[in-house]
Amino acid sequence: MELRHIRYFMAVAEERNVTRAAEKLGIGQPPLSQQIHALEDELGVRLFRRTGHGVVLTEAGEAFATDAKRLLDNAQQAITNAKSAGRGEIGQLNIGFTGSAAFNPVVAILIRKFRQSYPAVSLTLVEGNTAQLLSYLDDGRLDVAFVRLGNQSPAGVAFHHIAVEPMKLVLPTTHPLAKKRKIPLNALAQDSFVLLPREASPTLHDVIIGACRDAGFTPLMGQQAPQLSSVVNLVAAEFGVSLVPASVCQIRVEGVVYADVLGGNISIRLALASRKDARTAKVANFLAIANDPTMNLSGLVASD
């Protein structure tokens, strides 16, 4: 039994007339009658009873029509689902982000825009450090990931520029320079720096160390923080000072102040990573939103 046989049957059942059903289907009346007889022979029952004005369903035909309609509906839904999946309009998208990237408003804006554009796509959000996220991309557990982009360029991964974010100083309010709006970085050469471990955030760690060395000193390594939000809390507890992406300034913790770096142009890049060999329609749709020039993402980085 083929789907076309079921379509033929339903056309006759709806029209209650073989000639009109044939016209609706765009085939001849004799071939349609032959197909209906072949279907009845296959089922071993009569589906139609002839009347003076056409045909009516038999009891067996009534029962078959109920399931036949459901089969056709399911087949149409399967076609619709396949086309929607091919356009990236349904399914699941797994998105990763680093702890520092999560504070950037661009991340929330892009995810919100994608959800508005593709409401039938389910999103799974995964937080991790850069190494973890790139590993998850490689083994297929993630489709895209927001990462702080350094000099690393793993094979098979494409990076899509999202934004360049300035770095800000964070100091305890008891620090002698806490009332300054702009502070030269080398003025903190004798302070301990609260940092994330390099294995947790290599790009952020290297940017801070590199900036200090460019300013003429090697930073004193103080208490390590398990995550970026903890950096601010440890600074508030007077464990030292630090440099953080400007978007972190939205963390308002009593006991800290944020300041610009005087005479320095220290920044960190935010990128969207995806696998080069797995450009599904869902991923392509997400990247299209991220690369849309009308989004004007460059001006959305928070500042103090």
Image (cartoon, rainbow, N blue to C red):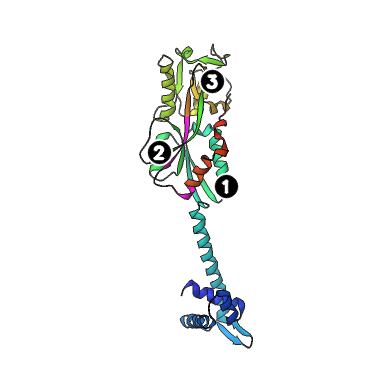
Question: Callout 2, which amino acid?
Answer: Leu
Please indicate whether residue 37 sits to the left or right of residue 53 in the image: left
Q: Residues within 10 Å of mark 3 (few under 14, many from 20)?
A: many
At x 44%, y 22%, the residue is 208
Q: Which residues are magenta?
A: 269-282
Q: Is residue 219 visible?
A: no
Where residue 219 sits in the image (x, y, percent)?
A: 42, 17
Figure check: 106 above or below 45: above
Where residue 196 sits in the image (x, y, percent)?
A: 44, 26
**C-alpha separation, residue under disc 3 versus residue under disc 1:** 41 Å
Where residue 75 sits in the image (x, y, percent)?
A: 51, 66
Q: Residues within 10 Å of mark 1 (few under 14, many from 20)?
A: some
Label drawn at residue 134: 2
Residue under pointer 3: 236
Q: Secondary structure at mark 3?
A: helix
At x 60%, y 79%, the residue is 20
Q: Is 82 included in the stretch rendered in magenta?
A: no
Q: Secondary structure at mark 2?
A: helix
Label drawn at residue 117: 1
Q: Earlier in the sequence, mark 2 or mark 1?
A: 1
